[in-house]
Image (cartoon, rainbow, N blue to C red):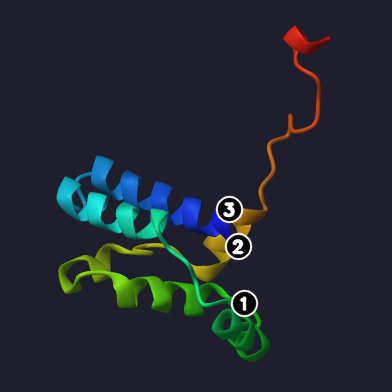
Amino acid sequence: MNRMLSFEAALTDALRSEGEITGEVCQQVTDILGNSKPDLPHLLEAASRDGVIVPELVRQVRDRLPADCRTAFHRGATSQDAVDAAGRVSPHAGRPTAGSR
């Protein structure tokens, strides 16, 4: 869940970097994401219905956003993008680094 929220924060920042959204909108979205406490029972219910939690997670976060920020959130992304990003692990995870040998 935290990785999905991190993906959404990174996506929002990328949209800001590309001039797709303003810095103010980006800040408002990332503030909400940073303080997000998703409703787990509703996420689990949605997962049993939809097969994934992302649509419900997006709905919950959008409901907390000011109206002028809602279209910026999850913009250009799919549920699969969020799932894939959350599931990614660094190819170097768990490997010793040169300094730790």
Q: Is mark 1 on a helix, strand or loop?
A: loop
Q: Distance between the residues labelled 1 and 2?
A: 8 Å
Q: In the rendered structure, which amino acid carries the disc numbered 2?
A: Val
Numbered circle sitting on residue 52: 1
Please tell me whether residue 10 is drawn above or below residue 69 in the rendered image: above
44 up-or-down from 96: above or below: below
User: Spatial distance from mark 2 to mark 3, Cα to Cα?
Assistant: 6 Å
Left or right position of 81 against 27: right
Q: In this view, does 60 lie to the left or right of 67?
A: right
- Asked which quadrant contains residue 74, the reply is bottom left
Q: What amino acid does circle 1 point to? A: Val
Which element carries disc 2, helix, strand or loop? helix
For the residues bearing labels 2 and 3, Cβ distance under 8 angstroms? yes
Q: Which residue lies furthest to the bottom in this view?
A: 49
Q: Name the residue located 62 percent from the left edge and 77 percent from the top edge.
A: 52
Residue at left 33%, top 60%? 32
Marks 1 & 2, CB-CB < 8 Å contact: yes
Q: Name the residue under label 2.
A: 83
Is 65 or 10 nearer to us in this picture?
A: 65
* Marks 1 and 3, how far apart at CA: 14 Å
Q: Which of marks 1 and 2 is nearer the N terminus?
A: 1
| Res. 14 visible in picture | yes
Disc number placed over residue 85 in the picture, else none: 3
Q: Residue type at mark 3? A: Ala
